[in-house]
Image (cartoon, rainbow, N blue to C red):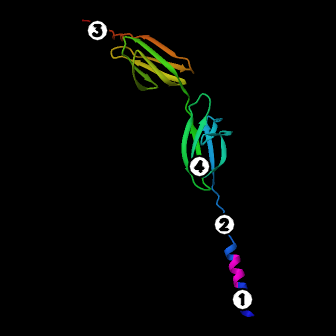
Amino acid sequence: MKKIIVFSLLAMSFLLFVGCEVTTESDDSATLIVDSAPMGAAIFLDGSSTGVVTPATLEIDSGTHQLRLELAGYEDYNETFTVEDDGVYTVLALMDLAINSTLNVTTSPAGASIYIDGAYTGYTSPAVIQGITLGYHYIRIYYPGYNEVTYYVLIQENVPFNIIEVLNYPVPPYPVFDITYP
């Protein structure tokens, strides 16, 4: 009888042990913190709108994702990132003004070098330079042997800015005479 009881207890213990599923809780979520300058950009994750704007904190699945931020008047911000389980990924997007305006430069004589904000553009006059960011810019026009010309201009959305300039020879310095009196 003892053998039957011991055997029954062992069999029940075995069945209980085998019948129990051992599960570990797998939390495959992560946190995404998104901010932008300027604020208020719409957040898209993996091609779908999240319905929120920056700044925001979102609970997302771990793994690789594609983030896109959209704000009127600014270029879209895109980033691909990977975040681990229970991880936190932070994005601070510095959004660039939209590129959608044109600068037209005509000079006499032609062939003057055109600089924008101190950097040579690779263009010489006459030139149509597309893709100028909105906002204020320093424009410098230089032709060897002539006075250079500078402008501080406001490039506005969908409004071409035209510069027409007749370049002047530099004024020669007045001759200096050494006059001595006896």
- The three-letter code of the residue at mark 3 reads Phe
* Above or below for 167 versus 67: above
Q: Residue at x 73, y 90 (%)?
A: 4
| C-beta proximity under 8 Å, tags 4 and 1 | no
- According to the picture, the residue beneath numbered tag 1 turns out to be 6
Q: Say which of marks 1 and 3 sits in front.
A: 1
Q: Residue at x 40, y 25 (%)?
A: 120
Q: Give the quadrant of the N terminus.
A: bottom right
Q: Say which of marks 3 and 4 sits in front.
A: 4
Q: Secondary structure at mark 1?
A: helix
- According to the picture, the residue beneath numbered tag 4 turns out to be 89
Q: Residue at x 57, y 46 (%)?
A: 65
- Image side of residue 67 versus residue 126, left or right: right
Kindly identify which numbered label has been placed on residue 177.
Answer: 3
Q: Say which of marks 4 and 2 sits in front.
A: 2
Total marks placed: 4
- The three-letter code of the residue at mark 1 reads Val
Asked if the stretch drawn in magenta spans residue 15, the answer is yes
Label 4 neighbour load within 10 Å: few <14, some 14-19, many 20+? some
Give the residues in magenta. Answer: 10-16
Predominant secondary structure in magenta?
Answer: helix
- Image side of residue 14 versus residue 77, left or right: right
Label 2 neighbour load within 10 Å: few <14, some 14-19, many 20+? few
- According to the picture, the residue beneath numbered tag 2 turns out to be 23
Mark earlier in primary sequence (1, 2): 1
Q: CA–CA distance between discs 3 and 4?
A: 74 Å
